Each structure stands twice: as structure tokens, then as C-alpha cells.
Image: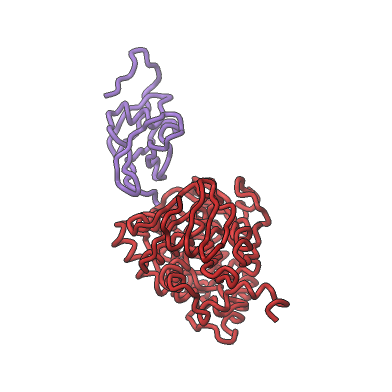
Chain colours: A red, B purple
Amino acid sequence: MPQDHDIAVVGGGLLGSAIAFGLAREGQRVVVLDEGDVAKRASRGNFALVWVQSKGLGMPAYTGWTINSTQAWPQLEAELKERTGLDVCLEQTGGFSICLSEREMEQRRDVLRRIHAQEGVAKYDVALLDRREVEKMLPGIGPDVVGGSYCPLDGHVNALRLFRAFHVANQRLGIDYKPDHRVGAIDFERGRFRLQTSQGEIEAGKIVLAAGNANAQLAPMVGLSAPMQFNCRGQIVVTERLQRFMRYPIGTLRQTDEGTVMIGDSYEDSTDDRGINTAINSVMLDRAQRTFPFLANVNVVRSWSCLRVMTQDGFPIYDQSESCPGAFIACCHSGVTLAAVHAYTLAPMIARGALDLQQTGVFSAQRFHVQKAA
Amino acid sequence: MFKRLPDTQGAAVAVTIDGEPFNAREGDSVAAALLAAGRSYCRETPVTGAKRAPYCMMGVCFDCLVTVDGIGNRQGCLTRVEDGMRIETQHGKREARA
């Protein structure tokens, strides 16, 4: 028995939830088809930064898209709080990238120079600070810290609570959330989509593929493509709760609203999210202790690995199908940072039935098909 | 609430609990000493401030976290009492610098 939905969102992680939220705000009747707790879930393993600095080298439009989202984030936080009572603890204090040698400082300077030298890149403040200036803002840093870059647009949230807040808000918006509905096949006939799930068929007039790395398999079913890396594993280590000592997050080290310290940002060629590589943890922890030496006396309580959702060039994909009108796709790594722009900018386009190519055209997967596009 | 068994052996070990002198027994864990001293709770949780007392007594539940000799989040049930030890109820998060 087909149910009456305007649109089916495939994927119930942060990306799918943010888009579903935005669609429901536009009055769409939305069903979210989620794989369930067995899913490889980047939304549960991420580092929770709302981050600008370092992003967009190679695609200046990504810098602007990211800044748009960080600027819309306070509205998202306020709206989620109003709808759910949940505080996602957004802190946009500005954030650091820390350098532990002169060489790292030089590399940092070079990356920032290259990002800002790009034609058409959105301008934003980022300052290279020497050790003394960093220490004023991050007291307790160790002697190995040479300096760092500070960007006032950067910040962080409680990403697990964000995930929950979206689900609570979406339920209250009347979104039909269906867990354990893994989508195996999608048919398009007479302007309607029929999605074969592990618990029967779902029909909708439009669909959004927001299934993370699984988008690679789903996209060709509706005339789209999503070239993903698959093997981009990261690890995170979490300490016990400490009294607040960091006023600003660092890209690899941050203190959460509830006091734990998260240490992360490894990259490893692996598709297995079930174990951890202790050698990688030891490098991360060594760098963390060189940044804040007193962390040597702090207990670790958890560590995990998680697979990033990473397209082949690392930049988002937003696309609409020509052969199956009404089919949309979204793939991105930074589901936390981009949550606000997904909810408030991307979802309304999808609700209207067409992407605004002025804003999203550059993110089309056509960029991976140079011969075809040319 | 808790009483020592009548055949308990062991010499007295002088500790302080929140500054008050208390005679624990040799071999006591900090958690056992707190229960013997009649403490109904040993910490307030960092997020909600709920009171917690030693529960599993075998290193699993982490509910007996206390500050011992100035260092927070010590598992009371896995720490033996020593002469002169300063045991303190922990209020919320552990100190950030040890």
C-alpha cells in the first residue's frame, strides 16, 4: 500500500536529517528511509566542528558555501532549541590550527595563502599568531607550540545532541522516519519513484539521496553519480570530563560542552570502522600532550574509528537528475558545519523542485566527468 | 548503614574525608572507607549534579569517583587507603591541571 509522501529522503544521518528538516519547514510531506543502527554512521563518529579555515583549497565556492552555513548556524541553533528544548551548545568563538614546528608554521602560512589567492574566493579573517599570542588565548600550551592560525568564524557544537535535536524536531514536524528501511533499488516510472526497502515498497514524487558512501551505489539507479573515496577512516580519542580549560577549539583538539576532551583528525586508508589503530592514536595523543602537557595526567575513556563520507575530490556533491526529474543527491563530508545551509538553502531548492545552479552548479558531479562535460 | 563484620582484622589507617579525620582499616579501598564512614554519596556528577555513591565495588561502574590527594576522578574502589591520605567528595568535573 503506497503511502502519500511528496518526497523520500534516503539516509537519516545528519545530512538527511537536516535536508528533511528543511523540506518539512517548506510544507513538504517527507519520509526518511534510514538503514538503522547497523549503518556506518559518520553522524555518530564525527568531531563536531563548525569550521571554515582550511576549507576550499581547489574549489573556492566551497569556502563561500561553508561561510554561509556558519553564518546561518545561530538561527539553526535557536530554531532547534525552540522546537525541541534541546541545546546543541553552539560556540562560535573562533578556532585554532596549532603548529608544533617552524616547518608546520610555514606549511600553514602556505595553505592559507593559497586558499586566499584563489580567484573569486570569499574573503574572511584568519590570523597567523606567534606562540606568545596563542598562549594568551590558550593558556597552558606547551613549549613545542610555535604558533598557529586563528579564524574568528570557527566553532563547534555538541554533534550527538544535534543529531538527536534534528530527529526530535523532525518528528514534531510530522516527518515519517522509518528506521531499518535500507533501500536496495529505486525505480522511476510515470514521474513517480518506487523505492524497494528491506521492509517493503515506498513511493514518492521526489527523492533525495543522502545515504553517505552508499550514495555511490544508489545514484546510478536514478541517472546520477557519486564518486566516493570509501577508504577514509579517522579516529577519535576522548578523555574524562575536566573543568573548562579551553576557550577556543583547535581543529584536532577540543573540549566539549560537558567537559570531555576530544582528540582527533587522523586519516587512514581503511574501510573497516570496527577497530582502531593504536599506533595512530599514539601519534594523536603525543601531539595533544605537546599542545597541552598537563593532558599527560588525564585519563582516556573512549576511542573509536569512523569512516568519513568523502567524495573523490573532498568537496560536496549536490546534483539533480536529468533522466529522472525529481531525483536529487547530496554527498558531503562536513555534515555538521553545513547543517544550516542544508536546512535553509539546499532543502528549499529541492522543495521547489530544482537546484539553483547559480549556487550549487559548481558542486555538480559533472566535474568528475570531464570528457562527458566537454 | 554499613557495619564492619565483627571479625574484621587490620590496623587503623588515618585518613581525612573532606578534611575530617577518619580511621580506615588496612586493606580498605577508598570506597569501602567512605561507606564505613557513613557517607551516603561521594560525588556529584559533572553534567546534572546528581549525587552518586560507590556501587559495583569492582572497578566497572565508575560511580565511586573521588578526589584523592588533590587528583580527581580516582576510582575509590580500586584505590587502597594509605596513612595521611586526603579523600574528598568530588563536585562535578575533575580539575583541569594536575
Question: Image quarter for residue A288?
Answer: bottom right
User: As rendered, which of A346 and A265 lies closer to the eye?
Assistant: A346
**Quadrant of the image containing the C terminus of chain A:** bottom right
- The x, y position of residue A146, in whole percent, is 57, 70
Q: Residue at x 53, y 77 (%)?
A: A360
Residue, x 44% and y 31% (percent of image)?
B80
Residue nearer the viewer, A271 or B34: A271
Whether residue A286 is visible here, answered yes or no, is no
Residue A324 horizontal/vertical position (percent): 57, 68
Quick one: which residue is furthest to the front in this view? A190
Residue ranking furthest to the top? B7
Compared to residue A261, the image places residue A152 above or below, namely: below
Q: Residue B59 at what x, y percent from top left? A: 46, 33
Compared with B75, A233 (above or below) is below
Foreground residue among A70 and A206: A206
Q: Quarter-wise, where is residue B55 in the image?
A: top left
